Image (tube, rainbow, N blue to C red):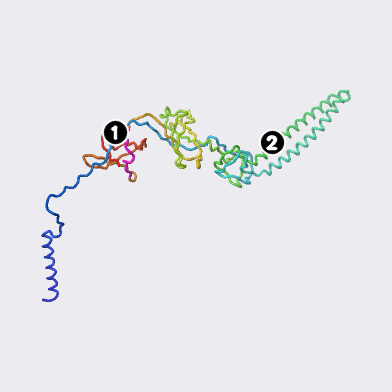
Amino acid sequence: MNRKTLLLAIVALAVLVVSLVWMQGGFYHKISGGRTTPPAPASTPKTIKVEKITVQGEVTVSGTVVARDVARVSSRINGYILEINVDAGDHVKRGDVLLKIDTKDLAEKEAQAAANLESARADLIKAKNDFERFKVLYEKQSVAKKDYDDALAKYEMAQAAENRAKAALDEAKTNLSYGTVTAPFSGVIGERGVNTGDLASPGRFLMSVYRPDSLELVASAGEQYAPFLKEGTSVKVDIPSVGLKETSKIREVVPQRDEKTRTVTVKVPLNQKTGLTPGLYGTMTFDTHAAEAIAVPRAAIRIIGQLESVNVFEDGQVKVRQVKTGRSLSDNRVEVISGLEPGEEVVVP
């Protein structure tokens, strides 16, 4: 017998031995004889019974932060902007210089108006002296009445010319002062509409200034909610970008309805907070009619991505049930809009 044949015989014998041991149960765990202990039954989970409760109805609407007291500063003259001293977000006081406009042409007009006034005053002095002289001569009947009337007319014309020259100089000085634009009141720069070198013209928007203590949330609610929205009604306000959550009272309900959207505009004052500026998004929540709702503890809700579910104990088993939640309620509960019925048992931690 050669070596290869011997090796095959040994392998075959080993396989035979292993097979016999397996058939005799040699590879199974052996337990001692006698009665075995059955597995302990699964414990019953902690549950609550779903019931309908009466909750205060609430409606949440979106709005925008707006400044009640805001001034849109515009140019009153033509000219290139020479310098700008403030930017959006800067705090200013009443009278602070915001920007300056080139007034070279206006300065020349003021100088010319001043010279015209001096000339008019000189003409007035001469006309007055002539009139007084002709008046004395006329009273002595030394000159004709026509000469007296001519002197009086020239004197009156000189007076009118001086008045016009005064008005022209006042106007020139006023226009010259418009080259320095100042803050109309103490507040914050809201937005800036020009840059250095831009050409200003009468009516062109330069920048806005608002009072930070006049900020309010302006929201639109469906006209069906108008009965619940009155001046002085308490509402909950949320400005998420600055973490502002507070209870405030409605300051104004605009009587005019929006014909296109069928909404009513509501204005609610806000407390000052760092970062609170016009244009921010916010929400306003107000009470409506009380209604019945199903509510469960928030801890019972499981959220995976966009899916919400609860564990329901049914027929001795825990089953997963998809639900849709609504408002957050008091006592750390949440409203369940669909997926549960009264009487069912929900597993709670």
Say which of 45 and 170 sits in front: 45
- Label 1 secondary element: loop
Residue 171: assigned label: 2
Q: Is residue 158 left or right of residue 208?
A: right
Residue 302 among magenta residues? yes
Say which of 156 and 35 sits in front: 35
Residue 140: assigned label: none
How packed mark 1 is, by other alpha carbons closer than 10 Å (few <14, some 14-19, many 20 or more), is some
Residue 313 among magenta residues? no
Q: Position of residue 204 (x, y in %)?
A: 59, 40
Q: Is residue 85 left or right of residue 218?
A: right
Say which of 278 and 30 sits in front: 30
- Disc 2 marks a residue whose amino acid type is Glu
**Residue behind mark 1:** 51
- Label 2 secondary element: helix
Q: Which residue is rendered at x = 11% and y = 65% of the image?
A: 17
Asked if marks 1 and 2 touch (Cβ < 8 Å), the reply is: no
Q: Which residue is rendered at x = 22% and y = 44% of the image?
A: 42
Q: Is residue 218 left or right of residue 175?
A: left
